Amino acid sequence: MKLKFKELNISGYERVTVISEEESGLEAIIALHNTTLGPALGGTRFFNYKVFDDALEDVLRLSRGMTYKAAIANLPLGGGKSVVMLDPTKPKPMPVIRAFAEAVNELQGRYICAADYGCRSEDIIHLSQLTSHIVGVATEKSSGDPAPYTAWGTIKGIEATLNNIYGSSSIQGKTIAIQGLGNVGIRIAEYLYWRGALLIVSDLDESKLAYASQRFGAKTVALEKITTAECDILVPCAIGKVFNEEIIGKLNCKGIAGCANNQLTQETDAKLIKKLGIVYAPDFVISGGGLINVSFELKDKGYDPIAARNKIDEIYETLETIYAQADKTGASTHMTAVALAEYRLKFGSETSEINACLS
């Protein structure tokens, strides 16, 4: 294969590479945001972007989020992401898979890929046969699909958010609205159901709505109505840019705690959410369960499911720290979390004391 690499000079990013291969039709971008703490780990997203700039914006935002996600969880990893321009609903051509795996190998371990939106289990299996720089593969030495762990981390984040609002982390009897019933969202719905939540759900797929209604007694609403649904907690589990000034003004929830990446259209949206008295769980904190879990596959002693679960449980305490600090300083929870992540990137400290980086 004759891979073509085009390097983009983008401020704040260590390396952003556009990769193409004419024979296979590969068009992809791999972004390494920051590897101060370790190699960049981040999923491979398959999506049929309308224009190149959309793909570039997505990979930049996602890779930056992975840096913060790793730092906030005190993981020895950096932030990276990759996007491949393909229809996520169709089988992936093997020539494209081969070409992308070769591109990952060219980075010699600086980037470790994993499943993301549009990357199915069979895609991960095929990639794992062509590159060793991959995690989340279903083998006896790994944990497989990270979705259950992302979902569990989100549950811990929902509990922390409820505790901040009501003084109790109990989910029993709370009305929770879930936007998106994908691989993670449907697991969150099930976890919440067994804990006594009253569910409101939305998704493009009518079969998923029917399943949630039948299995969990969920109320189903149109996509455009989920963000305005009256609820205790709104749980975004779909694509990014969920919130902007217009949508924030129509919110009818007391808290936001979901696993979708890059939920804010711009960082100032977090201030608007705070002004309304809504508690916002920063997305790169609450969605860290999957990353935390696969990070244990890289341990010298091998994968330890108990240690991985216990580390994911720490999302609760991390959010408690962020909420308390945001209340103390008046800053948004998002900027408080960013400050903590940047503090750890700079000093490599596990401390949760972030007054210094906010002053």
Image (spheres, grey):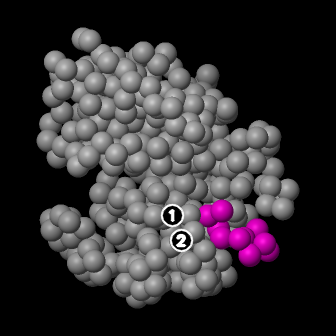
Front residue (pair 123, 7): 7
Does 71 appear in magenta? no
> Tag 1, which secondary structure?
loop
Residue 151 location, quadrant: bottom left
Indicate yes or no whether the magenta region holds residue 330.
Answer: yes
Split into 4 quadrants, where in the image is the N terminus?
Answer: top left
Looking at the picture, how far across and down is residue 186, in whole percent? 32, 61
**Compared to 15, does 287 lie above or below?**
below
* Label 2 secondary element: helix
Mark number, residue 154: none
175 is higher (above) or lower (below) than 338:
below
Q: Residue at x 36, y 85 (%)?
A: 229
Residue named by callout 2: 269
Crowdedness of circle 2 by 10 Å Cα count: few (<14), some, many (20+)? Answer: some
Nearer-the-camera pick, 89 or 332: 332
Q: Residue at x 49, y 27 (%)?
A: 111
Return the x and y of residue 27 as percentages of the image width and height: 26, 31
Residue pictured at 57% horizontal, 39% vertical = 11
In whole angstroms, how far apart are the C-alphas of marks 1 and 2? 6 Å
Instruction: Please report the bounds of the magenta region as a residue range.
Output: 324-335
